[in-house]
Image: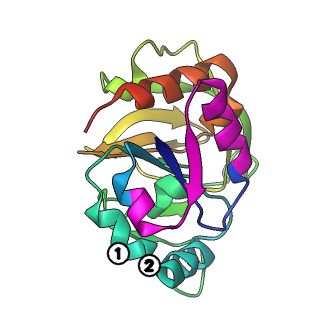
Amino acid sequence: MTVILNTGCGNLNSVRFALERLGQTVEMTADKATILSAERVIFPGVGSAEYAMEQLRQSGLDTLLPELSQPVLGICLGMQLLTDSSTETTETVTKTLSLIPGQTEALSNEGVRLPHMGWNQLQTISDHPLFHGITQEDFFYFVHGYGVKPSEYTIATCEYGQAFSAAIAKQNMMGVQFHPERSGLSGEKILRNFLEISA
């Protein structure tokens, strides 16, 4: 069974429908026992990092996520929350989950419009199993104004006025900045690859 974390942030149903089209049994939940027993976990999110972290703290998911040993995939804000911090709130830095080293910072608007919204291709792609069969010809759908700078934990990059991490990974934790559930056949490939990764 694949669990989608019910964080209260974003349209979880689009992720659920995408997984069900792939024949998956899916449950959306914040129940700790159900999450711990799942084969894999998807952590989606849209909106504010500060609000999302407050929701995670209220549900106890902020302390549960570091305990997970099964494959975990963060999507969009879910990926950003896997890093150490976010500057999305200008008054303060929001401490996030620190599961993959990195900081989420505002994208530069020099020469481009923000947010980065629409289809884009990847510039570099590692041999991580999440990207099996993916090439620079594939397009993915992005909606974000903040990003994670490329680092040793970056497994794919994208370019929009500057290079940013399109995907990051450390051990069982993975994250993608784009929305695979809205990225057609290329996104379906990413989800299929994730479903084939074992603990």
Residue 111 can be seen, yes or no: yes
What residue appears at the point 34 percent right and 43 percent down from the top-left corner? Answer: 71
Q: Is residue 32 magenta?
A: yes
Position of residue 177 in the picture relative to residue 194 (left or right)? right
Q: Nearer the viewer, residue 99 or 146?
A: 99
- Amino acid on which the number 1 mark rests in the picture: Thr
Q: What secondary structure is found at the residue carrying circle 2? A: loop
The percent coordinates of residue 150 (x first, y second) are 38, 45
User: Is 14 situated above or below 198?
Assistant: below
Q: Nearer the viewer, residue 80 or 106?
A: 80
Q: Which residue position holds label 2? A: 60
Q: CA distance from mark 1 to mark 2?
A: 6 Å
Magenta range is 13-35
Q: What secondary structure is found at the residue carrying circle 1? A: helix
The percent coordinates of residue 54 (x first, y second) are 55, 82
The percent coordinates of residue 57 (x first, y second) are 48, 81
Residue 107 can be seen, yes or no: no
Position of residue 160 in the picture relative to residue 127 (left or right)? right
What residue appears at the point 50 percent right and 49 percent down from the top-left corner? Answer: 3
User: Is 186 situated above or below 37?
Assistant: above
What residue appears at the point 42 percent right and 31 percent down from the top-left corner? Answer: 194
Residue 26 is drawn in which quadrant? Answer: top right
Q: Are marks 1 and 2 in contact (CB under 8 Å)?
A: yes
- Disc 2 packing (10 Å; few <14; some 14–19; many ≥20): some
- Disc 1 packing (10 Å; few <14; some 14–19; many ≥20): few
- Amino acid on which the number 2 mark rests in the picture: Gly
User: Is 131 situated above or below 62?
Assistant: above
What residue appears at the point 47 percent right and 63 percent down from the top-left corner? Answer: 81
Quadrant in which the C terminus is drawn: top left
Residue 185 is drawn in which quadrant? Answer: top right
Q: Which residue position holds label 1? A: 63
